[in-house]
Image (spheres, rainbow, N blue to C red):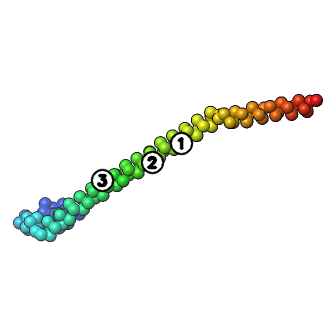
Amino acid sequence: MAGILRPFYCELCAKQYKMASEFEAHLGSYDHHHKKRLRELREAESSRAKEERQRREQKREEREMAKAQEMAAQAAVVAAAVAAPTPRSEVIMENQARCRMLMIRHHNS
């Protein structure tokens, strides 16, 4: 571990050099630049993938919200229909009440 902390260590390539000239030569080498470009490419791809995941998640949430709003609107329509009796149901309820009254009168006589 102490060897890694030396001044001529390239963290990107995990290589240790004893002399500054070797280290500088390494920093200009194809191997070092290739690894550097590869790391940058991976970071850029990771960033794009993260943005895409966030965009898909936002679209999913928007769809869920729209669906929830639609269901709430449908529930409100159903609740209003159930709460407000239709003229036909009022007639049926009146007829049922009349029948009960007739049955009670017939039973009592």
Up-down: is 89 above or below 60?
above
- Sequence-first tag of 2 and 1: 2
Residue 18 in view (yes/no): no
Please give the name of the residue rendered at 45% of the width and 48% of the height, measured from the top-left corner: 64
Tell us which disc is closer to us: 2 or 1.
1
Tell us which disc is closer to us: 2 or 3.
2
Bin the neighbour count of mark 1 within 10 Å (Cα to Cα): few under 14, some 14-19, many 20 and up: few
Quarter of the image for the C terminus: give it.
top right
Label 2, label 1: how far apart the Cα atoms are: 15 Å
Please give the name of the residue rendered at 91% of the width and 33% of the height, measured from the top-left corner: 107
Picture disc at residue 64: 2
Q: Residue furthest bottom?
A: 31
- Sequence-first tag of 2 and 3: 3
Residue 75 in view (yes/no): yes
Query: Residue under circle 3?
Result: 51
Picture disc at residue 74: 1
Q: Residue furthest right?
A: 109
Q: Position of residue 106 (x, y in %)?
A: 90, 32
Label 3, label 1: how far apart the Cα atoms are: 35 Å
User: Which three-letter amino acid code belongs to the residue tagged 3?
Assistant: Glu
